[in-house]
Amino acid sequence: MEHSSDILLLTTKLKIPAPRKNYIVRQGLFEQLLKCGEMSIIFLSGGAGTGKTTLLSSFIQKKELKNVCWLSLDSSNTNVYSFWLYFTAAVSPFLKDEGSLFNLLRTNPDTKYMENLLITLINQLWGDEEYYMVLDDVQCIRDEALVRTFEFFIEAMPSNFHFFMLSREDPPVYLGPMAVSGRLMFIDGKQMQLTPEEGISFLKDTMKLEGSEEELYQLNDYAEGWIGGLQLAAAAKAAGKYSGQLLRAGGGIASQYLTREIIDALTEPEQDFLIKTGYLSYFDGEICQKLFHSLTKQDFNQMMERFMEKNLFIICLDEQNGIYRYHNILSEYLKQQFLCLPDEEKSECYKITAEAFENKGEYEEALQEHCEAGNYNEVLRITKLMEGRIEAWNYLDRVPIELLFQDADLAAQCFLYNLGNINTERCHVIYEKFKELYQDTDLFRFVDFAQIYFTSKDGILPQCPALTDEQMEQIPFGPVMKAVLLIENAGALLDRMNYEEAEACILKGIKIASGLNSFIGFFAYNQLSQVYEEMGRLNDCFSCYTKSKEILKTVSGLMGIDTNYYFGLAGVYMRRMELDQAKDVLEQTRQMLTERHIHADITDMTLAYHLVEMKFLSGENDTAVSYVEGILSEYPNYSVLSLGRLLYELACINRLSESLSERFLNELKIAAKYKQQPFMKLLRARILFQRGMADEALKETEDILAASRLHHNMLRLTEAGILKIVMLSHMPGGGSQREITNLLVEEIHYSYKNRILMPFYLDRITLLPLLKELYQKSSGKQLMSPEEVLFLSDIIMICGGQTVKENSIEMLSAREQEVLSQLSLGITNREIAENLCISQATVKTHVLSIFGKLGVSSRMMAVEKARKDGLL
């Protein structure tokens, strides 16, 4: 081959690239590279953008490595003459011939004497001083003559000369002798991956990428340690746009890069293979043979070997069985390329792979392909085969509503899925369709129980009788939905104090759904805890929540179900007056709702409800009263029955207004379900007593005590007994001291094992003198067991140790200040939400907080108070 003797060298190929500013120190890899003086060859292998060049240039600078030369190769250096000319130019500073060898090679392009020239070069490099040569993009070396001369040089090169070879593919030359002699260091693409800590450091410190912690961590996970992917994300300003959005951000930066650096270097059959398998979450030889009819198993294995050699961002999931997947970013790129294929071709691919996955028993994968193809009848068929498993629900939710209701069981599963995700709009659509088709049947019961979660009708559950076994048998549900019916049925039994039956229903539901759907187990244990809490079995509540928390770790795809766990757990802590624990749980709940952008009336109001209780139990009565009044004004459609516990707490401090108590009594008269509940009877009895109707109130309380003893309800026994003590203590000619003492001893007996402290605290003003007197009497007498006496001392501490905090204005948060400013304009919640780019439910939450902090109960009062205090 003829070569010009006047060839001009590109000096940029011989310069050591400067590390980028604020580069991350790859400490683990740096420690390996420090052994470079002991190695003849250090081979760094990794795909495009894995950071090989940056790693080595930063290492050279950081460790101040001496006598380093650099040669960046490209396609123009793939012949013998060009390669060795550049090579000699790069190492010239190490030679003592003042450039004579380089000039000789430059003026004599005949390559048949190349080995003689290389011998001269090797001899000149020999010495005591260590020399380092970096060859970047070694994969460009393909020419047979060049490979032969390069291998000759490697075999004979002096021990003081060291190669760093950077390549996207496996070594183009034979390095066996170096490996055997222990003078070869190999760093592969897996080692080149950034650790999670390095990835976050790269995004924050090197790329200065803005975004929340959650967004950056998700983007880092998505890039799977590929530094090139993180660079593309930063270039596209894609924080918060992880997953497929990355490839659509920044004008197609990522797509252009992947096309140029990866796809264009492949053959047409290889490109076709990638594009037609890129939409799959994983693939193997069997699936690909069905997709490509002429592909043999040997062809598949050889293609995978070639891809792996090229470091093509293909991840081997199972080497023994030959199962692979693509790197996230390459996968998204390939999906986009697949979508550009003709519709008929795409549809055929979806159909073939869906059948292949189903034959393997991989129903989720089959559902994914059928959904993409719009084959919804197939989605329904396979979902039915999965017998209510949660893994199918995401795909089931993509089925059009009319088609979905061909099967009531599948429609019910879809409803439950959206309920778990607090997707109130979709729940409402499915609810209305159930109502249209099944309103006058027992089947409608399944969705009717949950309307409180997606309507703002009145905030209370519908009044439904418990279903019999025969009624449930007639409902066309599979095992999982039958289990849900049983768990729902427990709620109706609970209202009638049928605790044993309620518990049995839930345990039966758990047994039926076991091994099929973990969400049902989670739901069941939370409901069982509600039964135990109602009975005062608070210790058993914790056991249930421990089990539901363990199950929660295995449940994916339902982002809103945690709220049921957190709110329930906080309630148990409050009953035991473990306020620090309750506060922590509620803070976790608040953070979760914010991070997941869950803003529905039911969740926001429930959080506000619990926060009000915390104020009552912390002695901040004025703030609590303002909160209650705020809830009433912000949720005017809700029944006061849904605020029963808050009304009870208002009544305990004599702050329940006449109008509100009247409203409660009137609504209770027509609410048959609530009228029979022990707690509602307790509240009614307290209100009647405060109105001077002592005899009727006392009779109602006695009825509650009798029923609670019969059904072993320790919570209501404690509450009713304490209420009776309060009545007797304030009635002219009330009960004797002996009767009151006996009652007090009885309530301590019922409450000490489960540490039911809240009822004592709520009536602490009346009880504290009686408790102290009882403690003195119990000294040296056998009125109570030692455990009960110890519990009595705890009650006294709780009732006497809590200090009522002064009502001072708390500092408004920045967002509350913004909402307050909007309130001063006299605009609606919807307008405030639009102006501040938040949901209406969030506006309501902030308004309630403002009311509580300012100690007011209306918007007008809040604005007036804020102006008076200089907040506006």
Image (cartoon, helix red, strand yellow):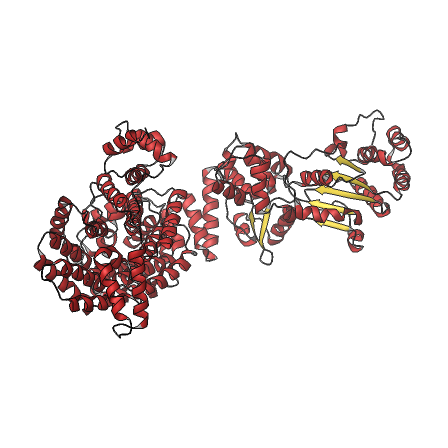
Residue drawn at (57%, 44%) of the image:
273
> In the depicted view, which residue is nearer to us: 745 or 99?
745
> In the depicted view, which residue is nearer to us: 368 or 29?
29
Q: Horizontal and vertical percent for residue 350?
A: 46, 46
Q: Horizontal and vertical percent for residue 288?
A: 54, 50
Q: How many dots with numbers?
A: 0
Left of 550 or right of it: where is 663? left
Left of 97 or right of it: where is 173? left
Residue drawn at (48%, 49%) of the image:
353
Residue drawn at (16%, 45%) of the image:
657
Looking at the rendering, in which quadrant would you find the N terminus? top right
Q: Horizontal and vertical percent for residue 114?
A: 87, 38
> In the depicted view, which residue is nearer to us: 302 or 603?
603
Q: Horizontal and vertical percent for residue 865?
A: 27, 32
- Dividing the picture into quadrants, the one containing residue 702 is bottom left
Asked whether residue 854 appears in the rendered view, the answer is yes
> In the depicted view, which residue is nearer to us: 755 or 254?
755
Asked whether residue 516 appears in the rendered view, the answer is no
Left of 84 or right of it: where is 249? left
- Dividing the picture into quadrants, the one containing residue 409 is bottom left
Left of 211 or right of it: where is 156? right
Residue 392, placed above or below residue 62: below
